[in-house]
Image (tube, helix red, strand yellow):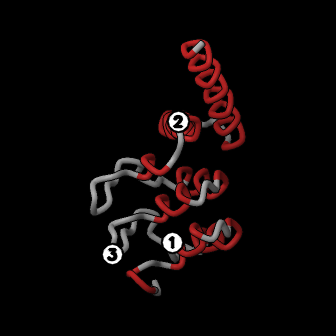
């Protein structure tokens, strides 16, 4: 594992740049710890969330990224996202955690449906 500025791994850099193809290759090769924290105690998921790159977020979550890790100012990756993104990732995480023999495509579709329902519920609550 090669560390860059601020002790970032290549996976951190790929996620910040929304370079999902390179992040996927890095994970597939087994060269990355999905929960490695850099000098700011941020994981690659923090950078994917900060970049609002849903594909990178899905990739990291399906590879077991921990959504509960806090950085040095005690924020988690969800603190960087707006409410709809948080709903989407929470649903996705829940589906992945409960997945038994479901295909990743089914899991992601279920997460999309869940986030759409949450968005509708919030819209009705606000009006």
Residue drawn at (67%, 26%), measured in percent from left and top? 116
Residue drawn at (53%, 72%), measured in percent from left and top? 11
Q: Which numbered disc covers residue 83?
A: 2
Report how far apart the C-alphas of labels 3 and 1 lie in the structure: 12 Å
Query: Where does the N terminus fall, quadrant-wise?
Result: bottom left
* Callout 2 secondary element: helix
Report how far apart the C-alphas of labels 2 and 3 lie in the structure: 27 Å
Would you say 43 lies left or right of 27 here?
A: left
Residue identified by numbered label 1: 12
Residue identified by numbered label 3: 39
In the image, 127 versus 60, the foreground residue is 127
Which numbered disc, 2 or 3, marks the residue closer to the eye?
2
Look at the picture and state if 116 lies above or below 23.
above
Residue 63 horizontal/vertical position (percent): 53, 56
Look at the picture and state if 33 lies above or below 51.
below
* Callout 3 secondary element: loop
Which numbered disc, 1 or 2, marks the residue closer to the eye?
2
Residue 55 horizontal/vertical position (percent): 67, 54
In the image, 116 versus 30, the foreground residue is 116
Question: Which mark is first along the chain, 1 or 3?
Answer: 1
Neighbor class of circle 2 (other Cα within 10 Å; few <14, some 14-19, many 20+) is some
Look at the picture and state if 80 lies above or below 85.
below
Residue 6 appears in which quarter of the rendering? Answer: bottom left
* Callout 1 secondary element: helix
Whether residue 115 is visible: yes
Residue 123 horizontal/vertical position (percent): 61, 19
Question: Which mark is first along the chain, 3 or 2?
Answer: 3
Residue 19 horizontal/vertical position (percent): 67, 69
Residue drawn at (51%, 39%), measured in percent from left and top? 86
Would you say 91 lies left or right of 120 here?
A: left
In the image, 123 versus 37, the foreground residue is 123
Neighbor class of circle 3 (other Cα within 10 Å; few <14, some 14-19, many 20+) is few
């Amino acid at each position: 594992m090669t560390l860059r500025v601020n002790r970032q791994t290549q996976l951190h850099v790929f996620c910040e740049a929304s370079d999902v193809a390179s992040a996927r290759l890095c994970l597939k090769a087994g060269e990355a710890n999905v929960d490695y924290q850099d000098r700011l105690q941020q994981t690659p998921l923090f950078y994917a969330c900060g970049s609002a790159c849903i594909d990178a977020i899905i990739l990291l979550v399906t590879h077991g990224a921990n959504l509960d890790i806090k950085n040095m100012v005690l924020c988690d990756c969800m603190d960087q996202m707006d409410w709809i993104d948080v709903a989407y990732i929470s649903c996705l995480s829940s589906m992945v955690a409960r997945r038994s023999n479901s295909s990743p495509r089914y899991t992601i579709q279920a997460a999309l449906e869940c986030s759409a329902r949450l968005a509708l519920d919030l819209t009705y609550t606000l009006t």
